[in-house]
Amino acid sequence: MQEVPAENYMPDQIQHAANPFYKGYFKSEELLGMGFKSVGENVKIAKNCTLVGLDKISLGNNIQIDENVFIAANSGPLSIGDYVHIGGGCHLNCAGGITLSDFSGLSQGVRIYSVTDDYTGFSLTNATVPKKFKNVKIASVFLGKHVLIGSGCVILPGVQIGIGSSVGALSLVNISLKEWGVYIGVPAKRIKARSQKLLELEQTLLLEAKMSKEYSLTTL
Ligand SMILES: CC(C)(COP(=O)(O)OP(=O)(O)OC[C@H]1O[C@@H](n2cnc3c(N)ncnc32)[C@H](O)[C@@H]1OP(=O)(O)O)[C@@H](O)C(=O)NCCC(=O)NCCS
């Protein structure tokens, strides 16, 4: 193995441009012409994501969607608020509608289903079978403000997660969760309250963002 000498290290931006594995992100300016329902400011979507049903996807401000995310919104809407992060490898099936509120986040590999097959055996299943032979459950999924979902979680149709709750890695969320709790497990259960300190930080962040926007307008 040959080590790269330290003097050959390149700054991140040049390194990314020279790296064939790194596809980079589409930014708001490019996304605006792609047919989304709405696109806010400072939105970044990794170029190797797959998004279907762009006309049903609303994007707020300050959003980052990382590599290899799959979003199927062709038969249902997806609404993403402000300051939302979707980690790499997430899967969102939006047939029944999915809402990710402001400051919510999905860690890597989270799967959210707003539609699912019937697993009881009383109907046929899977995507190749005509609808009349199936008994799919379709119900919207709602994540409140500041909800944080840990790596590898699965969220099933009809789940509403109250403001400020977090869910530990590898959990299964099959029923709605109340606000300001930390939940873990299969199925997810509340283990303790989650601090509301982050609400003060939200106020500071929003104030600073507003001031810096006003400053940049006055210096135009
Ligand atoms: C849920 C979580 C936040 C709890 O962290 P914490 O508040 O520090 O709590 P602790 O580590 O003390 O865990 C409390 C108990 O829950 C268990 N536990 C923690 N996380 C768990 C999880 N994801 N699933 C099942 N049990 C879990 C611990 O083993 C411990 O059990 P014990 O009381 O029998 O010893 C954390 O474990 C977690 O899952 N974080 C998600 C991290 C992640 O996905 N990051 C991705 C990048 S952002």
Image: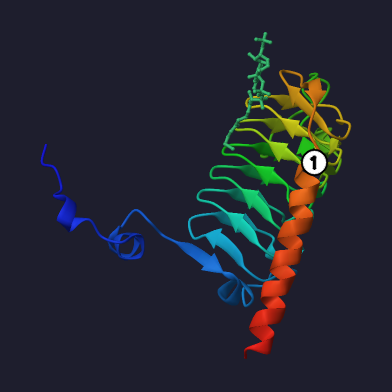
Q: Position of residue 144 (x, y in %)?
A: 83, 45
Of residue 52 and residue 211, the one placed in the foreground of this image is 211
Count of residue discs: 1
- Image quadrant occupied by the C terminus: bottom right
- Image quadrant occupied by the N terminus: top left
Amino acid type for the residue under numbered disc 1? Lys
Visual colour scheme? rainbow
Q: Seen in the image, is 47 located left or right of residue 81?
A: left
Q: Position of residue 155 (x, y in %)?
A: 74, 33
Q: Residue furthest left?
A: 2
Please report the residue visible at 34 percent of the width from the left and 53 percent of the height from the top.
Answer: 21
Q: Is residue 146 visible?
A: no
The residue carrying pointer 1 sits among few (fewer than 14), some (14 to 19) or many (20 or more) residues within 10 Å by Cα, namely few
Tag 1 residue: 131
Q: Position of residue 121 (x, y in %)?
A: 79, 19
Q: Seen in the image, is 140 located left or right of residue 208?
A: right
Q: Is residue 145 visible?
A: yes
Secondary structure state at the residue bearing disc 1: helix
Ligand 1 resides in the quarter of the picture at top right
Q: Is 182 located above or below residue 98 in the figure?
A: above
Of residue 53 and residue 193, the one placed in the foreground of this image is 193
